[in-house]
Amino acid sequence: MNRFKTFLAVVILVAAILPQTQAIAELIYPPHEDPAVASEEMDAYFFLTHYTSILTLISTKDYADANKLIEQLRFVYIPEDLKYIIHRYNNLTSELAETLERLDKLLSSASTLIYQYRLQEAHEKLSEASILLGKAEILLGDIEEATVAISNRIGVFAAPAESKVREAYERIQSVLQKLRELENEYLKLLKSIKETASNIEEEGLKPTEVTLTLNTTKVTVGGSIEASGNLKSNGEDLPNRSVTLLLDREPVLAATTGLDGSYHAVIKLPYKYVHTMTVKALYTPVGDDRGVYLASESPPASISIMFYESRLEAVAPDVAHPGLPITVGGKATSEDGTPLGGRQVKMLLDGAFLAEAETNVQGVFETEVTLSPMVQAGQHTLTVMVEPHGVYAGASQDKILNVLKITPEINIRAPSFLILPAGMHVEGEVRSSLGPLEEATVTLELAGSSAFVKTSQDGRFNVTMEMPLNLLLAGFQELKVGVEPAEPWHAPVQARIRVFIVNPANIGVASAAFISLGAVIYTKLAKAKPRRKQVPEVTPTLREAMFASTLKPEVRFEGVMGKVLEAYFKAMRTIETRTGISMKPHMTLREFLWEAKPKLNGVADAFADLTVLAERTLYSPHVPGVSESLKAEELALTIDRVLGGGAA
Amino acid sequence: MAPRKLLPILVLIIVLLLAALIWFYPATGDFRAGNPFWNGLTTFTVQFKASTTESLSDLPLTPKATALILVPYTQLSEQELEELKSYVSAGGTLIIMDDYGYGNQILSHLKLEMRFAGKPLLDPLFNYRNKWLPRITDFSQSPITSGVKSIVLNHATALYNVSETEALAWSSSFSFLDLDGDSAWDPDEPAGPFPVAAYTKVEEGYVVVVADPSIMINSMMVLDDNAAFLKNIVELQGQNPKVMIDQSHLPREPLDEAKGTIAAVYALASSPMGTLSLITLTLTVTLIPLWWRKQKVE
């Protein structure tokens, strides 16, 4: 029964702890796989399809979109063994797109120049285009070879002829053929332009010459210059022709030549604060002049642009806090120290617009700028710039701004001693150099328990933490107090204090365990000792009775054990009397048996049995039953009857 | 000592050792905050100082500046749905990360149009290692996608009924929904691009929907800009929010069950009544045999 109870208790305990096998709602699909060991695979069909798209765009001269798709290639997963070859393939494709795009632009530009009879410039472009065409041919050849090699590596040729992969491969081959055709198209165009240029040259068109003179070589920014010159052909003035004036290669004005072939124009310069600009005059034949004259360009004329440099002395704090305003000010002056009033001042943080202001008549500005609450702590660049205005160039100054969060201080009042379970009252206040922190979240953690509280307007907080019993016995624990400020300019802060915690429950359990253990050990020891003592305790009584020839009448054995011993005593007395062998104090029951046995005719076995019964009664934890006491008495009677009858 | 006495003691010791082993062995279940293995959330938890919640009843009453991450792999009760609604309405950021679970139940309760497709989203070209790990490179302009160039999903799904203004990220045009589960695109299967992340304002709060919870597991946080994307999501309403991860709607593995049982036993034992009972039981169990023997001897 006991065994069954023990077994049942253990089964219940194990069943409670061991994993439950209850049904868990299974998802239809696995939620994920370990990416570190996920199988590498590359879908040849989609890979080739993507390249087909890129090459198709190139073949249709949609280079911008082709480049976008090429850019996306970096997001395609390439197995390690294919990385190099595909990386090269991507580079070749990218290079081909770039080469063909440049070639297209050069040929277009050359064509325009030819149309304008600007043969010299056209030749330069055509020469460059020829080189690019050769490069494109090589690249295309490489791509064709690489396509075959990659297709082989990704198993295209191992796929059945009717498979999607083979279809994709056929499509990419077809697009490569189109690229060949495009290349031929460019070659034809190049040849055609060259032929046109050659034809023009053969036509023996009249050369022209355009001159350019500027009224000045120095001009204030935004000012005007007068440009004049002549247009001639073989010394003959060309009247009523349009001469285009180029400023830094950009056409700005067209002037018409007079009867003497001269032209005159006023060029209004832009407010571009550079120190030098270049002016050229360009004549391109139009209308009836086409097929008669060649184009011409004047030598460049440089002009120095004059303007006043502005000076800016910006003043900004070195340190700022997210979400808090800072004052940025300064003074804008010209080179000679003249204050620049009415000037727009912009402030940028890491290049992003922050604020703007305007200088007063003294050239001074000052404004409050609030940093974004989201700005990251660390070093930032504050750029203060004065916008250019009229003859005054702009100016800018960079300032290093250290964005910091203010670390608040926590003042905590908590008990230093605690007996569990208890409600621990903690109060305190959170302040910073700017004053108390309002609405800050205070988190308290102690020995596995936690609590949250918000600070009041004056930065104070108080909370009672419920501290239940836990595994602790006693000892110091750290109370962690974390503060998460509501304001972005305050940094989170933590503080720790030590609290001595006593857990009487666990001390009780431990004490109970020790008491139990002590009790068990004590009992065991006590049980072990009495066995040794029990012999002297009982035996002396017995032996006293046995060896003192006169047993005191008051010595009595009680209970079942007493009956067994009393029977043995009677038998021993009988044997002593009949055999003359006496039980000596140093003798054991068994030694007495061995000594007396030869003289116990017919009752040796009975006395042996009785001796065993007496020994068990005296020395073992076994408690004899009634049947054993009866047996002992019977054995004693038998001995008495056989050895002489009657009691001694 | 007699085997009869030794056996229960040995079994008790084994049970206690087993309990200690279960207690101290880290969780191994998917999306468990205490799971340090590839499928756990320890990296996320540490990085965002996230706390876990085992019941939606524990959500803060003033949820401003908090973000709740929910992986709804088990059904939600009406009460839980109401709690979520209250949480969002009062200003919390609810981040529903789901693929094949019960995310639509929440979206429906919040009366939002967007839905999880619930079918695997595969991308055979733009991916990390294989088509089950689609790589997302197309993002809309939003604070959530700031500084994010690409993210990698893991056995994800797609979203539908998402408006242009709500969508945050799209899969590539090579992606498709594998409706028949054959891992290959068939002509009747919808092809991308599909929205995979979206967000919308609900009263005072925000609901962010991501079509893959696995983006935040330890092994995925390190890939591409996944960590930056998640950071932007949790900081949608400001920096350093209090991040909570719901653990009550995840499938429980046998180890989780065992840990839960031990935790319950521990909680019971650490209550005043429990501790008192334990002391009484300990004393009774150990002292009764002694008392009984004494009686027997007498």
Image (spheres, coloured by chain):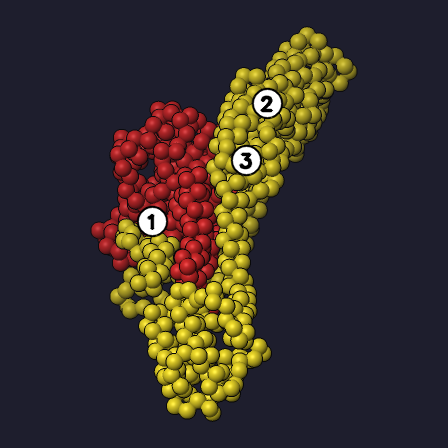
Q: Residues within 10 Å of mark 1 (few under 14, many from 20)?
A: some
The residue at the point 44 percent across, 79 percent down is: A648
Q: Secondary structure at mark 2?
A: strand
Residue tagged 2: A429
| Amino acid type, label 3 | Ile
Query: Residue B263 location, x and y as percent?
Result: 42, 47
Chain holding disc 2: A
Decide which of tag 2 and tag 3 comes sooner along the chain: 3
Residue tagged 1: B251
Look at the image and tell me whether residue B43 can be seen. Answer: no
The residue at the point 65 percent across, 17 percent down is: A327
| Amino acid type, label 2 | Glu
Q: Colour of chain B?
A: red
The residue at the point 36 percent across, 72 percent down is: A629
Q: Nearer the viewer, residue A412 or A185?
A: A412
Look at the image and tell me whether residue B181 can be seen. Answer: yes
The residue at the point 63 percent across, 22 percent down is: A432
Query: Residue B79 location, x and y as percent?
Result: 28, 33
Q: Nearer the viewer, residue A633 or A618?
A: A633
Q: Which chain is yellow?
A: A
Q: Residues within 10 Å of mark 3 (few under 14, many from 20)?
A: some
Q: Marks 3 and 1: CB-CB under 8 Å?
A: no
Farthest residue in the right direction?
A: A336
Q: Secondary structure at mark 1?
A: loop
| Amino acid type, label 1 | Pro
Residue tagged 3: A419
Query: Residue B100 location, x and y as percent?
Result: 30, 47
